Amino acid sequence: MPQANAPCLLDAKQMEVHLQRLCREISALFGSEDAIALLGIRTRGLYLAERLQAMLESNLQKEIPLGVLDITLYRDDLSELAGSPIVRPTEIPFSLKDRSVILVDDVLFTGRTIRAALDALLDHGRPKRVWLAVLVDRGGRELPIQAEFVGIKMDVAMTSRVSVHMKDVDGEDAVLLESRN
Amino acid sequence: MPQTYRFPHRHLLGIEPLSPQDISAILDQARAFEEVCERPEIKIVPALRKRLIVNLFFENSTRTRNSFEIAEKRLSAEIINFDADTSSLSKGETLVDTALNLQAMHPDLIVMRHSAPGAHALLARHMKASIVNAGDGAHEHPTQALLDAYTLRKRFGRLDGLRVAIVGDIRNSRVVRSNLWLLTKMGAHVTLVGPPTLVPAELKETWPGIEIVHELEPVLPHQDAVMMLRCQFERGTGAFIPGQGEYVRFYQLNAQRLRLCRPDVAVLHPGPINRGVEITSEVADGPNNLILDQVTNGVPVRMAVLFLLCNPHGEQVP
């Protein structure tokens, strides 16, 4: 639920600049590789991955396959949730074997989502390597996990939540600072 | 399905207490588990790790129990199979005593088949664990109806407005009652077909929207799906009909009758089938049949039920 008057960390224009940088960095490192793929983590990571896919494809002039991971079944706090959200299917329409995969999520915080995503991913096959791309790295890691591709790094208080809004689902591009709970 | 929806039930005693939204939630959830079941290698997720599930079967049911057991294993649950034949029940222990003994071992969920319709509700009152009804007499068999609905929804993309004929021994079938609740709640048109002795007219009191007819052939051209029921001779079907030959003559789904149906009609059967009685092999193995799809879909549907019940919402309703 969007909060009224939440401070804006990035507006649409600034978000576009950071997305472009992400895209340039990924292109520089992966542009020459044939077997690459993007894997978005539901739900915001998927929309971000779709955006990156379009940018990378026009940049590199080649098709970049895209898959989606739902990590709910692999969460380490699943038994503590009050009510399961309805889990949707993971869709990986390509073989992971010998492929370099870029996991995409909107915000990197504790690292627990990425831990779950790695477990889910490895149950589907054995990729050549896995990288992580995020729009915002807000610090606060609870596991030894880091992202290779970061749109913007910022230190955010534990009491705050970084909320990425995307045009396709939220009607606007913006990164907002909301209070947790 | 709104993002904020949470499955509100702690038990699955039948389809009757579920709302259309709850039914859709289970079917939507099953899609994610179907993906798990179709993975090339690791068909298992850690979602119910450290959960203890007891399979408590007071009646034989190899298929349903196997399907539940596969579902439990694919969710990484710990499983105990409680065989009622070798238990204290044969020494005269009551169901409640059995339940309390199980409770003392703190299971998270109990899957039970019992011949008495009220047994599951009784257990639910005495136990902290979630109870899943895996069949109770001729009352309900909710996971069968859910897997039938999943199979139909996958085939037709919807349940609303679907025309489904259920044919055969309606009287002795628990599958029918769960299916009647489910299909009518989801907006399907149901026609029950069978000899008057096997189709109790009073079903219309509970489900006024259904049709009851005694002739099979006239209804066949209008159906999207035909669900053939097993003649349950071991449950006394034979006492209600003049003879098997007569039943076959009027109600068997054979190739000739299949030609009366729409070319894309779906043929379902909860199994096990009596080849040559309610259905011929030609139809049971033919291109319209979804009988083995039903078996396949049973696993992800049961995974969905177990998963949703093990992580119940704060405000619980039975």
Image: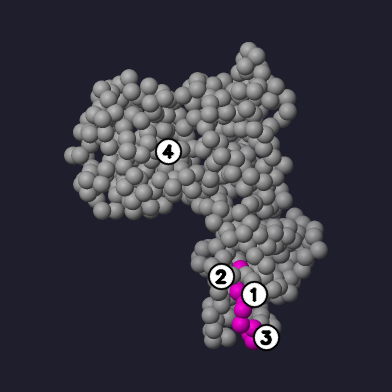
Query: How dense is the environment of label 4, judged by Cα within 10 Å: few (below 14), some, or many (20 and up)?
Result: some
Q: Is residue A87 visible?
A: yes
Eye-nearest disc, 3 or 1? 1
Magenta stretch encompasses residue A138: no
Circles 2 and 1: CB atoms closer than 8 Å: yes
- Closer to the N terminus: mark 3 or mark 2? 3
- Separation of disc 2 and disc 1 at Cα? 9 Å
Q: Name the residue under label 3.
A: A28
Circles 3 and 2: CB atoms closer than 8 Å: no
Circles 4 and 3: CB atoms closer than 8 Å: no
Residues behind callouts 2 and 1 on a single chain: yes
Q: Name the residue under label 2.
A: A94
Q: Mark 1 points at which residue?
A: A99
In the image, residue A113 above or below residue B149: below
Mark 3 lies on a secondary structure that is helix
- Closer to the N terminus: mark 2 or mark 1? 2
Give the residue drawn at x 80%, y 58%: A142
In the image, residue A2 above or below residue B68: below
Q: Position of residue B147 (x, y in %)?
A: 46, 43
Q: What residue type is labelled 3?
A: Ala
Q: Which colour scheme is used?
A: one colour
Q: Where is residue A146 in the image (x, y as percent from the top left)?
A: 77, 68
Give the residue drawn at x 70%, y 45%: B49
> Horizontally, is B102 left or right of B166 in the view?
right
